[in-house]
Image (cartoon, rainbow, N blue to C red):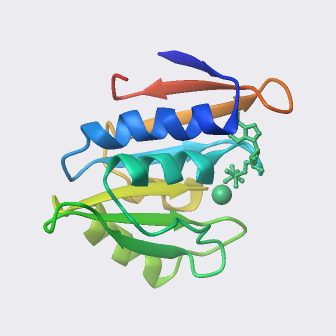
Protein backbone atom coordinates (compact mmCIF):
# COMPACT_ATOMS: atom_id res chain seq x y z
CA UNK A 1 0.00 0.00 0.00
CA UNK A 2 1.17 3.54 -0.69
CA UNK A 3 0.19 6.82 0.95
CA UNK A 4 1.02 10.35 -0.11
CA UNK A 5 1.72 12.48 2.95
CA UNK A 6 1.92 16.21 2.32
CA UNK A 7 2.86 17.65 5.72
CA UNK A 8 4.54 16.83 8.99
CA UNK A 9 1.17 16.81 10.76
CA UNK A 10 -0.23 14.40 8.14
CA UNK A 11 2.72 12.09 8.87
CA UNK A 12 1.88 12.20 12.56
CA UNK A 13 -1.76 11.47 11.71
CA UNK A 14 -0.72 8.44 9.65
CA UNK A 15 1.35 7.20 12.59
CA UNK A 16 -1.56 7.80 14.93
CA UNK A 17 -3.92 5.73 12.74
CA UNK A 18 -1.41 2.88 12.82
CA UNK A 19 -0.76 3.23 16.54
CA UNK A 20 -4.46 2.86 17.30
CA UNK A 21 -4.52 -0.57 15.64
CA UNK A 22 -1.55 -2.01 17.51
CA UNK A 23 -2.20 -4.59 20.21
CA UNK A 24 1.32 -5.62 21.23
CA UNK A 25 3.98 -7.79 19.66
CA UNK A 26 4.14 -5.81 16.43
CA UNK A 27 7.56 -4.87 15.04
CA UNK A 28 7.72 -1.87 12.72
CA UNK A 29 10.85 -1.15 10.68
CA UNK A 30 11.09 2.44 9.41
CA UNK A 31 13.22 2.92 6.31
CA UNK A 32 14.30 6.25 4.86
CA UNK A 33 17.14 8.76 4.82
CA UNK A 34 18.00 11.25 7.53
CA UNK A 35 15.12 13.76 7.65
CA UNK A 36 12.68 11.48 5.81
CA UNK A 37 10.28 11.50 8.76
CA UNK A 38 10.88 8.22 10.62
CA UNK A 39 10.90 9.82 14.06
CA UNK A 40 7.93 12.03 13.15
CA UNK A 41 5.99 8.89 12.20
CA UNK A 42 7.02 7.30 15.50
CA UNK A 43 5.66 10.33 17.39
CA UNK A 44 2.30 9.68 15.71
CA UNK A 45 2.41 5.96 16.53
CA UNK A 46 3.06 6.93 20.15
CA UNK A 47 0.06 9.27 20.18
CA UNK A 48 -2.11 6.49 18.72
CA UNK A 49 -0.95 4.19 21.53
CA UNK A 50 -1.81 6.83 24.12
CA UNK A 51 1.78 7.62 25.13
CA UNK A 52 1.64 10.94 26.95
CA UNK A 53 5.38 11.67 26.92
CA UNK A 54 6.98 13.46 24.00
CA UNK A 55 8.89 10.93 21.86
CA UNK A 56 12.50 12.02 21.36
CA UNK A 57 14.94 10.65 18.82
CA UNK A 58 16.83 7.83 20.54
CA UNK A 59 19.94 8.37 18.40
CA UNK A 60 22.38 8.74 21.30
CA UNK A 61 20.83 6.24 23.66
CA UNK A 62 19.88 3.77 20.87
CA UNK A 63 16.62 2.93 22.60
CA UNK A 64 13.87 4.58 24.58
CA UNK A 65 10.81 2.95 26.11
CA UNK A 66 7.46 4.59 26.74
CA UNK A 67 4.42 3.61 28.74
CA UNK A 68 1.26 3.52 26.61
CA UNK A 69 -2.33 4.08 27.73
CA UNK A 70 -2.54 0.34 28.45
CA UNK A 71 -0.74 -0.73 31.61
CA UNK A 72 0.39 -3.97 29.96
CA UNK A 73 1.76 -2.36 26.80
CA UNK A 74 5.03 -0.51 26.19
CA UNK A 75 6.41 1.23 23.11
CA UNK A 76 10.13 0.58 22.48
CA UNK A 77 11.82 2.88 19.96
CA UNK A 78 15.28 1.94 18.62
CA UNK A 79 17.60 3.89 16.33
CA UNK A 80 20.80 2.15 15.14
CA UNK A 81 22.02 5.06 13.00
CA UNK A 82 25.81 4.94 12.49
CA UNK A 83 26.17 1.95 14.77
CA UNK A 84 28.44 -0.66 13.21
CA UNK A 85 28.01 -3.35 15.81
CA UNK A 86 24.79 -3.68 17.84
CA UNK A 87 26.65 -5.54 20.63
CA UNK A 88 24.35 -6.51 23.51
CA UNK A 89 21.58 -4.38 21.98
CA UNK A 90 20.99 -7.24 19.53
CA UNK A 91 20.10 -9.68 22.30
CA UNK A 92 18.03 -7.05 24.09
CA UNK A 93 16.14 -6.36 20.87
CA UNK A 94 15.67 -10.09 20.29
CA UNK A 95 13.83 -10.33 23.62
CA UNK A 96 11.81 -7.18 23.05
CA UNK A 97 10.53 -8.15 19.59
CA UNK A 98 9.29 -11.45 21.00
CA UNK A 99 7.43 -9.78 23.87
CA UNK A 100 3.67 -9.44 23.29
CA UNK A 101 3.61 -6.59 25.79
CA UNK A 102 5.75 -4.39 23.56
CA UNK A 103 5.28 -2.57 20.27
CA UNK A 104 8.74 -2.14 18.74
CA UNK A 105 9.70 0.58 16.25
CA UNK A 106 13.18 0.44 14.70
CA UNK A 107 15.02 3.07 12.63
CA UNK A 108 18.18 2.02 10.72
CA UNK A 109 17.55 -1.68 11.33
CA UNK A 110 20.01 -3.09 8.77
CA UNK A 111 22.54 -4.25 11.35
CA UNK A 112 19.88 -6.07 13.37
CA UNK A 113 17.85 -7.42 10.47
CA UNK A 114 18.39 -11.05 11.45
CA UNK A 115 16.73 -10.32 14.80
CA UNK A 116 13.54 -8.84 13.32
CA UNK A 117 10.79 -11.44 12.93
CA UNK A 118 9.70 -12.64 9.49
CA UNK A 119 6.77 -10.65 8.19
CA UNK A 120 7.38 -7.60 10.39
CA UNK A 121 5.80 -4.32 9.28
CA UNK A 122 7.98 -2.22 6.97
CA UNK A 123 7.35 1.42 6.18
CA UNK A 124 9.53 3.04 3.55
CA UNK A 125 9.48 6.86 3.47
CA UNK A 126 10.50 8.55 0.24
CA UNK A 127 10.74 12.37 0.19
CA UNK A 128 9.12 13.77 -2.98
CA UNK A 129 9.47 17.45 -2.03
CA UNK A 130 10.51 19.45 1.02
CA UNK A 131 7.16 18.75 2.70
CA UNK A 132 5.80 15.72 0.82
CA UNK A 133 6.58 12.06 1.37
CA UNK A 134 5.50 8.83 -0.28
CA UNK A 135 5.08 6.11 2.32
CA UNK A 136 5.14 2.49 1.18
CA UNK A 137 3.57 0.26 3.82
CA UNK A 138 4.03 -3.51 3.97
CA UNK A 139 2.50 -5.86 6.53
CA UNK A 140 -0.32 -3.72 7.92
CA UNK A 141 -3.45 -2.07 6.51
CA UNK A 142 -4.13 1.60 7.26
N1 LIG B 1 5.54 15.28 5.21
C1 LIG B 1 6.48 15.24 6.15
N2 LIG B 1 6.58 14.16 6.96
C2 LIG B 1 7.53 14.09 7.91
N3 LIG B 1 8.43 15.05 8.16
C3 LIG B 1 8.38 16.16 7.40
C4 LIG B 1 7.41 16.29 6.38
N4 LIG B 1 7.60 17.50 5.77
C5 LIG B 1 8.63 18.06 6.40
N5 LIG B 1 9.11 17.28 7.39
C6 LIG B 1 10.27 17.60 8.23
O1 LIG B 1 11.27 16.62 8.00
C7 LIG B 1 11.95 16.32 9.22
C8 LIG B 1 11.80 14.85 9.55
O2 LIG B 1 12.62 14.60 10.65
P1 LIG B 1 12.61 13.20 11.42
O3 LIG B 1 11.23 12.73 11.63
O4 LIG B 1 13.49 13.36 12.61
O5 LIG B 1 13.33 12.26 10.31
P2 LIG B 1 14.17 10.93 10.47
O6 LIG B 1 13.83 10.30 11.79
O7 LIG B 1 13.74 10.08 9.29
O8 LIG B 1 15.62 11.33 10.35
C9 LIG B 1 11.35 17.23 10.29
O9 LIG B 1 12.14 18.38 10.40
C10 LIG B 1 9.98 17.56 9.71
O10 LIG B 1 9.52 18.81 10.15
MG1 LIG C 1 15.01 9.61 13.38
In front of the other: 46 or 30: 46
Q: Position of residue 109 (x, y in %)?
A: 54, 55
Q: Residue at x 79, y 31 (%)?
A: 131
On screen, residue 8 versus residue 110, left or right, reads right
Q: Position of residue 128 (x, y in %)?
A: 80, 23
Q: Position of residue 40 (x, y in %)?
A: 61, 49
Q: Position of residue 24 (x, y in %)?
A: 20, 52
In the figure, residue 95 lies in which quadrant? bottom left
Q: Residue at x 37, y 36 (%)?
A: 18
In the figure, residue 61 lies in which quadrant? bottom right
In this view, 138 is above or below 28: above
In this view, 4 is above or below 15: above
Instruction: Give the farthest residue toward the right.
Output: 130
Q: Quadrant of the C terminus?
A: top left
In front of the other: 43 or 38: 43
- Count the marks: 0
Which of the four quarters of the rendered structure image does ligand 2 lie in?
bottom right
In front of the other: 114 or 54: 54
Q: Residue at x 73, y 68 (%)?
A: 82
Amino acid sequence: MEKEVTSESAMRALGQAIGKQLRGGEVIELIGDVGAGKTTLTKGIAIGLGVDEDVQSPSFTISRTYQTARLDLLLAHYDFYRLHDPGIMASELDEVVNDKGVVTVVEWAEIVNDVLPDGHVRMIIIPTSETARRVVIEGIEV
